[in-house]
Image (cartoon, rainbow, N blue to C red):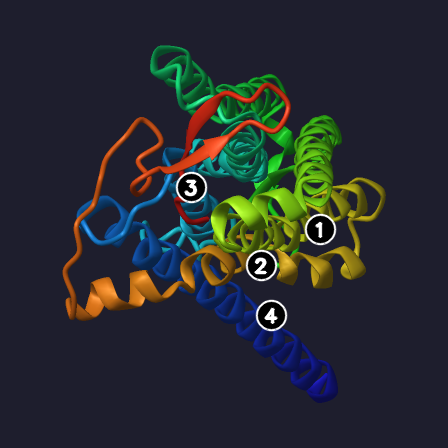
Amino acid sequence: MALAGVIGRDELRVETNSIIVFDVLNAIGLILTALALLPALLSATVSRTSTWKALMASSMVYSSSYLLLLPIGQRSVAQPEYGVCLFQASLVYSAPVFITFAGWAHVLQIYLGIVLNMLANKLWLLRINIMLLVTPVVVATFMFAVSLIVGVKHPDTIMIDSTRRYCHITTPLPHIITAVLVGIGTAGMMVFEVLVSVHLSTHWKSLREMSGGGISVFAWFRLGRIIVFTIFPFGAFALNIVGFFDSGSMNDKWNMLLPIMPLGAAFIFGSRTDIFRAWKVSYKTDSAWNIYEEPKPIPYVCLDCGKAFEFSSGTA
């Protein structure tokens, strides 16, 4: 009996420590993405596209979804209240979809800006920009609604997971739909990354001659960040697949990797010198505004049609 008591206390200590680590990682992701987003919203020295801001905001929603039980005092109870648990479970299933499609929208905006150079038609561009902002919200809301409906119809499937980190739904349907949507969003990101890469490779020499190396080098650097970020939604897709086929201790260990999506977004997109300088308030610069909310455009001549455009060189 004494040995069993010691083992029980050790298991409880390990479980408590894993919960603390999980919460700390999500809190760090939330703070870092907020620190990256605030200068883009408030500082005239930091210019970012609207889809970049949406991506940071979706990362904050993702981190917050796993921290929901903490501030309302439901973490320490045996089973959180049904309404709270259902809301968090629905948010947990929709958050990966939100951040993935926000990433897709950001890549597509880069494709439209760099490859198609459609800045000349401001009205058409504004409509596309609105579509890119609305689509991730619509898809994530759909996933939230599906999870909510499943939870309402089957209330006995709403419970806290075995590691006590967050609430989930034991029926496989939300796992399947989330995995499919994340897979579609990730595939969409990859398709447009390939299209941008092909364009840059094909016109590399001409772009360097016209821009003195600035546009082409910047575009490759920007695309590289997006390609690296694609790894994280793909990881979320894999975790959802694992969660569907395995709900045991192995899946519980893999769940510790869930906070890496906002952490990845914060480090990849937030680690820029202008953001650091904005927090230091150490310099001032002129900023121009357009529909893409990027700096002053650079003249660009279409290689195929010979028409002149303005190329926006905002940062990713």
Residue holding disc 1: 235
Task: Say whether disc 2 or disc 3 marks the residue closer to the N-terminus.
Answer: 3
- Under mark 2, the amino acid is Ile
Dot 2, crowdedness within 10 Å: few (<14), some or many (≥20)? some
- Residue 168 in sight from this viewpoint: yes
Horizontal side of 2 relative to 282 (left or right) equals right
Tell me, yes or no, whether the two marked residues, 1 and 2, touch with CB atoms within 8 Å. Answer: yes
What separation in Å lies between label 1 and label 3 (alpha carbons)? 20 Å
Task: Say whether disc 1 or disc 3 marks the residue closer to the N-terminus.
Answer: 3
Element on which disc 1 rests: helix
Residue holding disc 2: 260
> Residue 10 location, x and y as percent?
64, 82
Q: In front: 27, or 218? A: 218
What separation in Å lies between label 1 and label 2 (alpha carbons)? 9 Å
Horizontal side of 218 relative to 156 (left or right) equals left
- Residue 76 in sight from this viewpoint: no
Q: Which mark is residue 275?
A: none
Residue holding disc 4: 15
Q: Residue at x 49, y 19 (%)?
A: 138
Q: In front: 131, or 221? A: 221
- Under mark 4, the amino acid is Glu
